Image: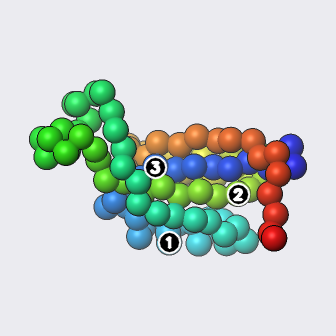
Amino acid sequence: MADTALLTLIVPVSLEEVLVDWLFENAPDRGFCSGPVNGHSANHALLTLAEQVAGRKRQIRFEIHTSCDEVYGMIDRLRRDFRGAAIHYWISPLTGAGAL
C-alpha cells in the first residue's frame, strides 16, 4: 500500500457543491468522502467576528484515496482551478485500506 495516499481537503462551505462537481470531473474513477468539520485557529484574522465568538469556523472536509502519483497531479489541478480559494490540504501515506 506504500504507493497509495489519502488526500484531505478542508474547504469553505461555500465551495462544497463546486468541489463535489470538480471531483466527479477530475477524479471520476475515485470515490471520496465529505462531511462538515469545525476549523479552529489562533490566527483570528482568518475568522469573522461571529466565528471568533463561536471559536470555530464551519468548513467541509473531503478525503480522496488515490495513488501517490495521481495525488500530486490533483493538487496541481486544484491549485490551477481554485487559486486563492482558501483550501487547505494534506497528503498522508496509506499503509492499508480495503473493504470488509
Residue 10 badge: 3
Label 2: element kind: strand
Mark 1 — residue?
Answer: 21
Colouring mode (rainbow / by chain / secondary structure / one colour): rainbow
Inspect the image, locate mark 3, and give the three-letter code of the amino acid beneath it. Ile
| Mark earlier in primary sequence (2, 3) | 3
At x 41% / y 70%, what residue is drawn?
A: 17
Categorize mark 2 by other alpha carbons within 10 Å: few (<14), some (14-19), many (20+): many
Label 1: element kind: helix
Inspect the image, locate mark 1, and give the three-letter code of the amino acid beneath it. Asp
Dividing the picture into quarters, in which one does residue 42 lie?
Answer: top left
Residue 65 badge: 2
Inspect the image, locate mark 2, and give the three-letter code of the amino acid beneath it. His
Question: Which image quarter is the C terminus in?
Answer: bottom right
Q: CA distance from mark 3 to mark 1?
A: 16 Å
Percent of width and height locating residue 84: 38, 43
The answer to whether 57 appears left or right of 74 in the picture is left
At x 46% / y 63%, what residue is drawn?
A: 35
| Mark earlier in primary sequence (1, 2) | 1
Dividing the picture into quarters, in which one does residue 98 lie?
Answer: bottom right
At x 28% / y 27%, what residue is drawn?
A: 43
| The residue positioned farthest toward the top in the image shown | 42
At x 40% / y 64%, what residue is drawn?
A: 16
The answer to whether any part of residue 48 appears in the image is no
The answer to whether 62 appears left or right of 49 in the picture is right
Q: Which is nearer the eye, 87 or 96? A: 96
The answer to whether any part of residue 51 appears in the image is yes
Categorize mark 3 by other alpha carbons within 10 Å: few (<14), some (14-19), many (20+): many
Percent of width and height locating residue 53: 14, 41
| Mark earlier in primary sequence (3, 1) | 3
